[in-house]
Image (cartoon, rainbow, N blue to C red):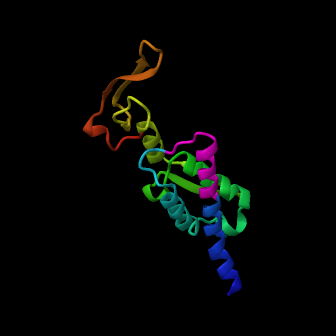
Amino acid sequence: MNNQVAQQQKPTKLTDLVLDRVKQMQDTQDLSLPKNYNASNALNAAFLELQKVQDRNHRPALEVCSHDSIVKSLLDMTLQGLSPAKDQCYFIVYGNELQMQRSYFGTVAAVKRLDGVKKVRAEVVHEDDVFTIGANEDMELIVKQFIPKFENQDKPII
């Protein structure tokens, strides 16, 4: 019984520790989180998600991962303004270390926060679709032509 109570309290203390660290960084390092981002809500969502994360041997991440790696993962998530509740990041166990990895949705959210970005799109290119890339005047990679064909939808993705 005492072990269950300890396991339930540990993540809460970890999320509180991370939230305190973020607030300290905001006060001393001119850190600003994204507009409309609630770090406390994201950390609470992470707390719920971490209870489900397991290593490859199906052992709970909160039992096998180091305290420091859990704190670092939660801090990384918060500083990037991500939330597992929005599928913007995932927690993955590597040995006894927890790592936060940004998902496609997290990358889209991060890019949309940049000045001048209005929309982010990704397209799947299938075999026999017409797809040409090039560079603009600033030597940035751009898509010059993309012509998908309905009949190619079942073909391999290239």
Percent x, y for residue 27? 60, 46
27 falls in the magenta region: yes
Q: Is residue 132 positioned above or below 67 on the image?
A: above
Q: Which image quarter: residue 1? A: bottom right
Q: Residue furthest left?
A: 150
Q: Position of residue 21 (x, y in %)?
A: 64, 53
Q: Residue 145 vs residue 89: left or right?
A: left
Front position in the image: 47 or 37: 37
In the displayed orientation, state which residue is furthest to the front. Answer: 27
Q: Is residue 92 visible?
A: no
Report x, y in % for residue 13: 65, 67
Q: Is 21 displayed left or right of 112 in the figure?
A: right
Image quadrant for the C terminus? top left
Question: In screen coordinates, is 63 left or right of 79?
Answer: right
Q: Nearer the viewer, residue 17 or 118?
A: 17
Residue plotted at (41% across, 15% down)? 136
> Can the viewer see residue 72?
yes
Which stretch appears magenta?
18-33
Q: Residue at x 34, y 44 (%)?
A: 154
Residue 144 point in image, percent of width and height: 35, 21
Q: Residue at x 43, y 43 (%)?
A: 109
